[in-house]
Amino acid sequence: MPASSLPVIHNTENHNFEVHLDSYTAELNYHLIGDTITFTHTGVPSALEGRGIGSLLVSAGLKYARENNLKVHSLCWFVDKYMQRHPNE
């Protein structure tokens, strides 16, 4: 199953975006303060690595930020790398 077809769940209570596959959960954590969303950590279990799930999570997080006119701040190297590779997202 391609990563792009996996549903991303925005768990506002836990302040993260999640993808569930098999018995695993991948997540992008964030803090929301005022009009700024700070992405703090992208976690993808080793069994799911290399499938594009981390990129799917970051894309969903950036889409949420864009749709809600939020400024983006990153404390996560994976988010930084993704934004460098996809500057128009």
Image (spheres, rainbow, N blue to C red):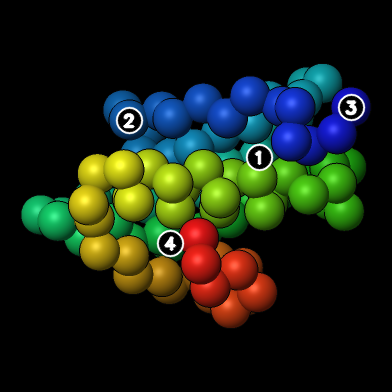
Distance from the alpha carbon under mark 3 to that under mark 1: 15 Å
Residue reaching furthest front? 88
Q: Which residue is mark 3?
A: 1
Distance from the alpha carbon under mark 1 to that under mark 4: 14 Å
Count of marks, rendered view: 4
Name which quarter of the figure residue 33 lies in.
bottom left
Q: Amino acid at mark 1?
A: Ala
Disc 4 versus disc 3: nearer the observer: 3
Residue 20, how many percent across, how many down?
68, 25
Image-based side of 43 in relation to 30, left or right:
right
Assess whether mark 3 and mark 4 are in contact (beta carbons under 8 angstroms). no
Local SS, label 4: strand
Distance from the alpha carbon under mark 4 to that under mark 2: 15 Å
Whether 13 is drawn above or below 27: the answer is above
Q: Which residue is mark 1?
A: 26
Name which quarter of the figure residue 45 lies in.
top right
Q: Residue at x 31, y 43 (%)?
A: 67
Q: Which residue is mark 2?
A: 12
Residue 2, how many percent across, how many down?
85, 34
